[in-house]
Amino acid sequence: MIELTNLHKHFKTKTGTVTAVNGVSFRAEDGAITGLLGPNGAGKTTTMRILYTLMKADQGSVLVDGLDTTRDADAVRRLLGVLPDARSLYKRLTARENITYFGRLHGMDEASIRINTDRLVEALGMADFIDRRTEGFSQGQRTKTAIARALVHNPKNVVLDEPTNGLDVMTTRALRDFLKTLRAEGRCVILSSHIMQEVGALCDHIVVIAKGRVTTQGSPDELLKQTGESTLEDAFVKAIGADEEVST
Amino acid sequence: MRTLMTVMIKELTETFRDRKIIINGLLMVPLLVPVLILGMGALAQSRAETQLESELSLPVLGADYAPNLVAYLSTQNIRIEPPPADVEALISNQERDVILRIDESYADDWRQSRAATVEILFDSSRQDTQIPLRRVERALVGYSRQAGAVRLIARGVDPALNQAVQVTYRDLATDEARRGMLLAFLPYLLILTAFLGGAYLVMDATAGERERQSLEPLLATPASRVAIMSGKIAAACVFGMLVLLLTLLSFKLSFTFVRSGPFAGMEVTMLAIGKLLIILLPMVLIGTALLTLISASVKSLKEAQSYMGILMLLPVLPTAILLVNPVKNALWMFATPFLAQNQLILMVLRAETISMVQWATYLGAGFGLGAVLWCIAASLYHSERLAISA
């Protein structure tokens, strides 16, 4: 379970201070998929970076399975499987070597790395390219490898920043099924997206973020009810504010 | 420690899979060495031979005033040329190295047994002038001494009386030391190789990885950032030492093929190679730690590379300072980066003994500086900015 309470984050730039996250709170339950939905630049990636300990919040706290991300950063990183927005592979290593490298960095022994890798290869359908060097991989193959790399240590909590970005329909579907298995296994899954259909089709709990704030949250049905709209798309547009430019 | 090894092995695996890096980074210098040794040896030898033994052309102004002197010079393998129209142009255009001018009053002075004036015109800033100048000087001194002796004898005086002190020379420089002078370029080459040999790897491992956006997932793992950074530094050190080892072995091999010239009979022992590697190890650490520090503080690989120009000049500094202001070896030198390596490498090349105090001072200072740079780099690695690529 992941719990974010009143997160704030500012950046100093040449032109002044930018408030990226301005009081974000929500809770992601185990055995559920929580979706962070918001337009580009809403603060989704920054929120996630604070959550996986890469950034420190100016204010507020994040608890992962009861552990604080600032006080127990190392322990928290062990509990998390992270697919960041920036997720390049090492192109002179094979997909398997990429995954093994991360397994070793998680302190796993070679046997467990092999077992977990084989399991992920099976689940994600990577058998035909697992031992090829990643140079020249398609977007789908790269994303699958990056996900396998993020989950090699079999983490209880899974955080994915825009996992379906740039994927074709078939790969997106396969990925959705994979995420549903993760949910069925009782894991806590958080993913971010700016694509409303995607979140609607997959998530049990939707958190709409705009301009660094949570504008509304709840199940897809609750969202429709709260906004008084008939389609999720309209609900989304209304939730983030009509003046926002939305990419769906 | 396990993380360090994991990162190191991964970085080296990646590097060794890139054929271009192997050729440019690892093999270029070692392959260049034989060309340098054989080429330089041959060139130096042929130049010395031609300048020492060939006939020297010497334009003489006012040859008519001293026909005997001119005739004497002709017997010294010097060909007398007619006076040129523009003396200074001849020198500055480098057409002739030396010109002799005989004074108008030469004949008068000579007859009255006064010191007659001749003037040698040359350009001291040109290396090429040294040998011709010395040949002309020696010929003139020889002629002067001969004529002086005749004058003394004519007056019934023993010419030896004129020489209160007889100076003779004995060169005590060892063969190794004399060759060491020829190898003045070697310390620079070795220090530069040590300092920047791992540059590509270490800049790519931090600035490059950040630019390619693979640093963020790496730093999201529980592996400690210091261990990750140390692994990258260690990989670059291994690579740098490998380049050095290959370079030194290449020197050893090249010298065995030299049959003539100044490098003939030169030998690089395995002991000397071992000593040189120990001397250069702190340099490798300093270089890679410094480059990591730079890579962690800049925005892109390109920006990191822009520091290379200034870094390449650093190893030249001590050599340049010593050239202008030569000083004797003192202990503080062994604690000064670049200067210390320069002095120690020369000592090994001259087969001089390095004392324990000198070793201790050097290794202490070298690894100390490396450790300081490592700490600064480590603190930069902990900054929030590092992981965020875009």
Image (cartoon, rainbow, N blue to C red):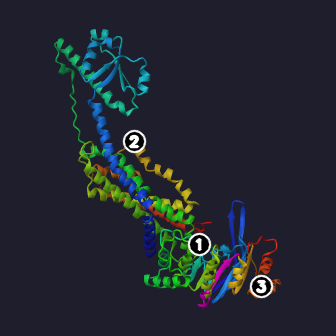
Whether residue B329 is visible, yes or no, is no
Neighbours of disc 2 within 10 Å: few (<14), some (14-19), many (20+)? few
User: Which numbered marker is on residue A139?
Assistant: 1
- Residue B12 lies, in percent from the top left, at 43, 67
Q: Are marks 3 and 2 in contact (CB under 8 Å)?
A: no
As helix, strand or loop, the secondary structure at mark 2 comes to: helix
- Residue A52 lies, in percent from the top left, at 60, 77
Q: Chain of mark 2?
A: B
- Name which residue lies at 63% across and 73% down: A56
Q: Are marks 2 and 1 in contact (CB under 8 Å)?
A: no
**Residues at marks 1 and 3 on the same chain:** yes
The answer for how far apart the CA atoms under marks 1 and 3 are is 32 Å
Q: Chain of mark 3?
A: A
Which of the 4 image quadrants contains residue B71? top left
Residue at label 3?
A223
The answer for how far apart the CA atoms under marks 2 and 1 are is 58 Å
Residue at label 2?
B323
Of the numbered discs 1 and 3, the one sitting upstream in the chain is: 1
Q: Which residues are magenta?
A: A181-194
Q: Amino acid at mark 1?
A: Gln
Lateral position of residue B14 relative to residue A175, left or right: left
Q: Amino acid at mark 2?
A: Leu
Q: Where B156 falls versus B125 (above or below)? A: above
As helix, strand or loop, the secondary structure at mark 3 comes to: helix
Lateral position of residue B45 relative to residue B327, left or right: left
Front residue of A109/A125: it is A125
Lateral position of residue A72 relative to residue B333, left or right: right
Classify the position of the C terminus of chain B by image quarter.
bottom right
Q: Amino acid at mark 3?
A: Leu
Q: Nearer the viewer, mark 3 or mark 2?
A: 3
Which of the 4 image quadrants contains residue A35? bottom right
